[in-house]
Amino acid sequence: MTSIDLNADLGETVGGIPTADDEAMFAVISSASIACGGHAGDDETMRLSAARAVRLGVAAGAHPSYPDRAGFGRVGIEIGREALTLAIAGQLEALRAAGADIRFVKPHGALYNRIVADREQAAAVADAVAALSERLGRAVPLLGLGGVGAAMAAERGLPFVQEAFLDRGYRSDGTLVSRGEPGALLSDPDAVAERAVLLATERVVESVDGRVVAVGAASLCVHGDSLGSVAIARAVRAALDEARVEVRAPW
């Protein structure tokens, strides 16, 4: 049977206000990337998310970002390698202290995109994950788009898992359409569910200009803070179940 991971970025509480219906999202996914204070999240939310993951059998991952709560981690900032490593390491430790069994690490927002091509920042993230791996006594995978980030992970003996986005538009070169541009976000549950089955079974996605793009992803992301995210996630899970695709975490 074909299998795929279904993940969502959760625990993104801002000023005590959740940005998603985490309880509903946790019920249909296999992995959760939990915000750990860089762009969103707080100690209480991290503890609640870690407990939910255990209760619902969902793999818990860390979702660190630039230290940028004001910009929700979506604005690139210039920060040295050592400072970035320390910032990421601090976020990972905060999530561990909240009781999470961290099975993977997925950077957030601008940092996620930056490490595809920026060697210094990719190395900083990989260094922090490698240090966590050493403390845990097991290699913690890095989840992302690939590029330099995957190479930096490999240099440190860390697994790298390719991710695809169900509710984001793709360009013909395989990159994401920037937020705010036409076609950047998908909100129709049926269309997103159809895309999920195609990605899981054929490893391809249709770009905004109608081209078929190969995407060898082992994990599919639906954003918890997207419009209609719960309906989208439920439609995706139902479509994958109907297509006899097993939804399970790879870590």
Image: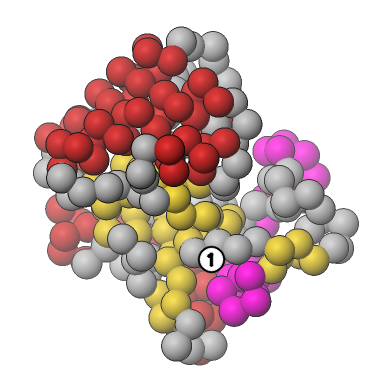
Q: Can you say whether 12 is above or below 205 in the image?
A: above
Q: Where residue 199 sits in the image (x, y, percent)?
A: 61, 70
Residue shown at the point (57%, 57%) measured from the top left: 164
Q: Would residue 222 be seen by someone viewing this image from the given angle?
A: no
Q: Is residue 36 left or right of residue 124?
A: left
Q: Where residue 116 sits in the image (x, y, percent)?
A: 59, 36
**Dot 1 alpha-carbon crowd within 10 angstroms: few under 14, some 14 to 19, many 20 or more:** many
Residue shown at the point (44%, 43%) measured from the top left: 154
Residue hosting label 1: 232
Q: Would residue 5 be seen by someone viewing this image from the given angle?
A: yes
For the C terminus, give its image quadrant: bottom left
Q: Can you say whether 202 is above or below 187 in the image?
A: below
Q: Can you say whether 71 is above or below 168 in the image?
A: above
Quadrant assignment, res 27: bottom left
Residue nearer the viewer, 120 or 245: 120
Q: Where residue 178 sits in the image (x, y, percent)?
A: 71, 38
Q: Where residue 118 sits in the image (x, y, percent)?
A: 59, 26
Q: Is residue 205 left or right of residue 148?
A: right
For the N terminus, give its image quadrant: bottom left
Residue shown at the point (48%, 61%) measured from the top left: 219
Mark 1 residue type: Ile
> Which segment did they paint magenta?
178-203
Residue shown at the point (48%, 11%) measured from the top left: 79
Whether 180 is among the magenta residues is: yes
